[in-house]
Image: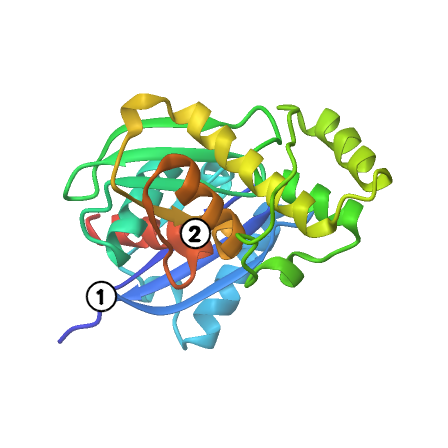
């Protein structure tokens, strides 16, 4: 079989994700911080992943970029919305994905998809840090914890405290106040996760009802957020094996059709 290799590059606010597909199968992937110069970082990472796999740009069938920086990557053959790419990436792991929820570093999205992974409707929050990975990072900074410390842990057994502020800045003050009142770290973390889930539920509205949802993005690595989402939206939450690369994977899938 002739090799058909495509590349997908997701240049986000917090990370750059690159996926190489060969004949529809994941050949390689990379996730790294966007840094201060995401375009330069993306070009460097793209060249490195090609070199690692003994490829040159001319060996690729096509390259598609997505994410915030999708229009500023010179090696791209086409730029595609992250909404479309995340839906396609979710459908790769879970055919007929239904509802796709993506929570990234600085935005959150919900996509209602048909049985083929095509987007029928979507909602997006890109104007406030509350309900995003940055909100969780802020909480971990206050608690002097690393994201890695909480990723695999379940917080179901803890009664989460109420985080009522819908603004990340005010929520920070609320969390500091809870610490001063000797509220346990685990209760605060559980409360933050439930706050993120409720924020997503509020953004989606009633029209995004589904029995199951695919959870993508960097925040999907955190088990406690997936648990809170499932409870709040009343759906089975399915998480891809590497949820951070879903957008880049979808972009590589889009490249197959060029």
Lateral position of residue 87 relative to residue 171, left or right: left
Lateral position of residue 48 relative to residue 148, left or right: left
Q: How is the rendered protein coloured?
A: rainbow
Q: Secondary structure at mark 1?
A: loop
Q: Which residue is mark 1?
A: 4
Q: What x and y, as percent, mark residue 131?
A: 56, 34
- Would you place residue 56 above or below residue 40 in this image? below
Tag 1–tag 2 contact (CB < 8 Å)? no
Q: Secondary structure at mark 2?
A: strand
Q: Which residue is mark 2?
A: 9
One can see residue 81 in this view: no
Which numbered disc covers residue 137?
Answer: none
- Residue at 33%, 41% (x, y): give it: 100
- Residue at 62%, 40% (x, y): give it: 192
Q: CA distance from mark 1 to mark 2?
A: 17 Å
- Residue at 52%, 43% (x, y): give it: 104
Q: Quadrant of residue 231?
A: top left
Q: What x and y, as percent, mark residue 116?
A: 15, 44
Query: Between residues 212 and 241, which one lies in front from this camera angle?
Result: 212
Quarter placement of the N terminus: bottom left
Which of labels 1 and 2 is toward the front?
A: 2
Query: Between residues 224 and 245, which one lies in front from this camera angle?
Result: 224
Lateral position of residue 68 relative to residue 234, left or right: right
Upstream in the sequence, badge 1 or badge 2? 1
Query: Between residues 28 and 63, which one lies in front from this camera angle?
Result: 28
């Amino acid at each position: 079989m002739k090799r058909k290799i495509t590349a997908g590059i997701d240049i986000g606010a917090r990370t750059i994700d690159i996926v190489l597909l060969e004949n529809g199968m994941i050949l390689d992937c990379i996730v790294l911080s966007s840094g201060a110069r995401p375009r330069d970082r993306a070009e460097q990472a793209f060249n490195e992943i090609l070199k690692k796999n003994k490829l040159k740009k001319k060996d690729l069938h096509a390259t598609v970029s997505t994410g915030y920086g999708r229009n500023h990557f010179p090696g791209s053959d086409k730029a595609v919305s992250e909404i479309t790419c995340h839906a396609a990436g979710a459908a790769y792991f879970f055919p007929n994905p239904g509802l796709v929820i993506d929570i990234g570093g600085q935005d959150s999205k919900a996509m209602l998809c048909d049985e083929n992974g095509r987007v029928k409707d979507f909602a997006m929050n890109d104007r406030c840090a509350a309900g995003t990975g940055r909100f969780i990072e802020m909480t971990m900074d206050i608690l002097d914890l690393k994201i890695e410390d909480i990723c695999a842990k379940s917080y179901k057994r803890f009664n989460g405290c109420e985080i009522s502020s819908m603004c990340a800045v005010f929520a920070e003050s609320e969390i500091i106040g809870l610490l001063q009142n000797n509220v346990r770290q685990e209760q605060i973390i559980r409360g933050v996760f439930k706050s993120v889930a409720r924020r997503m539920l509020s953004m989606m509205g009633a029209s995004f009802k589904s029995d199951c949802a695919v959870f993508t993005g960097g925040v999907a690595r955190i088990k406690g957020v997936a648990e809170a989402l499932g409870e709040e939206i009343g759906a089975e939450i399915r998480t891809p094996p590497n949820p951070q690369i879903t957008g880049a994977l979808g972009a590589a899938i889009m490249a197959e059709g060029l």
